[in-house]
């Protein structure tokens, strides 16, 4: 076994935020609450519940406060929110008692950052620094996210030093966790391995989180490469919900149930009940009224009991 592979990992579920915000329809508040509570029952200890974005920009998340106030989760679950700017933080702190950690973010790509939030990278980082102090003063855990860490559809390759330089600045602000987003699915396993090796050297003591999309079918392979490089923190979305509108045809984040299945089969403990997370994904599929793209929804867990008894075996390899 690779000596850098951790024996256990933490998975943060981002479907209720990153997943729901990219759905074409607005999901009813009661349905969101029911689905989030099913995620809590599955054993996930970190769930991104909402985002304090403008409702006219992302109407799918306009009921974030109602969801935060209505959801009932075990005390072991850390409730996270994404905060885009100081105005959003004002709104978030008004209901501070309903969540435990706050995420600030920037894109490593200047073009993507402008297109995403209509600001330069430096303007965003200046606001992030101002927010970081207020978040810490409120007794919240501060997380940071760097989008397009592995490539940008507008600018192409993003220098590793640029990404890690931004990460170091977030660490200086007090972020104890930094997530690296493969926003449009441009990462490959070889680069992921090198990336997390370099990141662990430059960011000692910081929790490094991998966030991959399955745009080109390499999401789980990239997660495996990050794991082998020592990464013990991952983000995923049940049912493979979410994604990015660029490029056209992008699929969602890697599916939580597929990630859990892979890790558990490798002997890496996730703390998540695979059957229950599959049930949650199937419930989301029913709620949305269309098939979702995770593999485990269809296939279910691996069955090592030989229950089929030789019935219906395929011909050939």
Image (spheres, grey):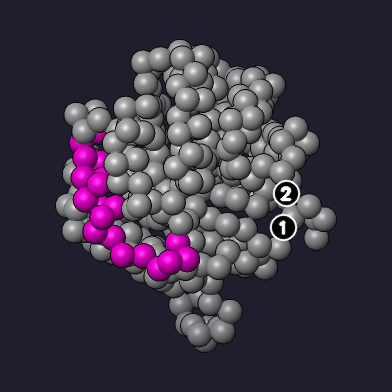
- Graded by Cα atoms within 10 Å as few (under 14), some (14 to 19) or many (20 or more), the crowding at tag 1 reads some
Q: Is residue 67 magenta?
A: yes
Pointer 1: what residue?
6
Q: Would residue 52 be found to the left or right of residue 172 on screen?
A: left
Residue that appears at 80% across and 60% down:
1
Asked whether disc 2 touches disc 1, contact meaning CB atoms under 8 Å apart, the reply is: yes
Q: Would residue 87 be found to the left or right of residue 308 on screen?
A: left
Residue that appears at 42% across and 48% down:
80
Relative to residue 57, is residue 154 depicted above or below? above
Relative to residue 28, is residue 44 depicted above or below? below
Q: Would residue 274 be found to the left or right of residue 28 on screen?
A: right
Pointer 2: what residue?
230
User: In the rendering, which numbered label is found on residue 137?
Assistant: none
User: How far is the residue under mark 2 from the one under mark 1?
Assistant: 6 Å
When asked about the image quadrant of residue 127, the answer is top left
Depth check: give the residue in front, 260 or 177.
Answer: 177
* Image spot of residue 26 (x, y percent): 19, 44
Relative to residue 10, is residue 168 depicted above or below? above
* Image spot of residue 57 (x, y percent): 24, 28
Depth check: give the residue in front, 29 or 225.
Answer: 29
Q: What element carries label 1?
A: loop
Whether residue 175 is visible to the viewer of this picture, yes or no, is: yes
Q: What element carries label 2?
A: loop
Marks 2 and 1, the one that precedes in the sequence: 1
Chain part drawn in magenta: 58-77
């Amino acid at each position: 076994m690779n000596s850098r592979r951790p024996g256990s990992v933490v998975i943060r579920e981002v479907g209720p935020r990153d997943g729901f915000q990219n759905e074409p329809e607005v999901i009813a508040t009661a349905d969101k609450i029911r689905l989030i509570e099913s995620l809590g029952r599955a054993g996930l200890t970190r769930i991104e519940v909402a985002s304090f974005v403008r409702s006219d920009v992302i109407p799918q998340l306009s009921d974030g406060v109602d969801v935060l106030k209505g959801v009932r989760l075990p005390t072991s679950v850390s409730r996270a929110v994404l905060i885009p700017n100081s105005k959003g933080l004002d709104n978030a702190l008004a209901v501070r008692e309903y969540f435990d950690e706050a995420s600030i973010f920037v894109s490593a790509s200047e073009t993507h950052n402008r297109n995403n939030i209509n600001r330069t990278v430096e303007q965003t980082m200046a606001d992030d620094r101002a927010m970081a102090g207020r978040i810490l003063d409120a007794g919240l855990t501060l997380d940071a996210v760097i989008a397009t860490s592995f490539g940008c559809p507008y600018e192409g390759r993003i220098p590793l030093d640029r990404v890690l330089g931004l990460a170091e600045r977030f660490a200086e602000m007090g972020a104890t966790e930094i997530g690296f987003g493969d926003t449009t699915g441009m990462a490959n396993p070889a680069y992921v391995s090198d990336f997390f090796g370099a990141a662990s050297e430059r960011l000692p003591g910081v929790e490094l989180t991998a966030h991959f999309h399955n745009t080109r079918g390499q999401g789980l392979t990239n997660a495996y490469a990050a794991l082998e490089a020592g990464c013990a923190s991952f983000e995923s979305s049940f049912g493979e919900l979410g994604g990015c509108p660029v490029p056209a045809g992008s699929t969602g984040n890697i599916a939580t149930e597929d990630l859990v299945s892979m890790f558990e089969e490798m002997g890496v403990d996730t703390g998540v009940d695979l059957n229950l997370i599959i049930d949650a994904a199937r419930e989301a599929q029913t709620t949305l009224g269309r098939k979702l793209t995770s593999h485990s929804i269809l296939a279910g867990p691996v069955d090592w009991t030989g229950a089929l008894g030789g019935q219906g075996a395929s011909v050939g390899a």
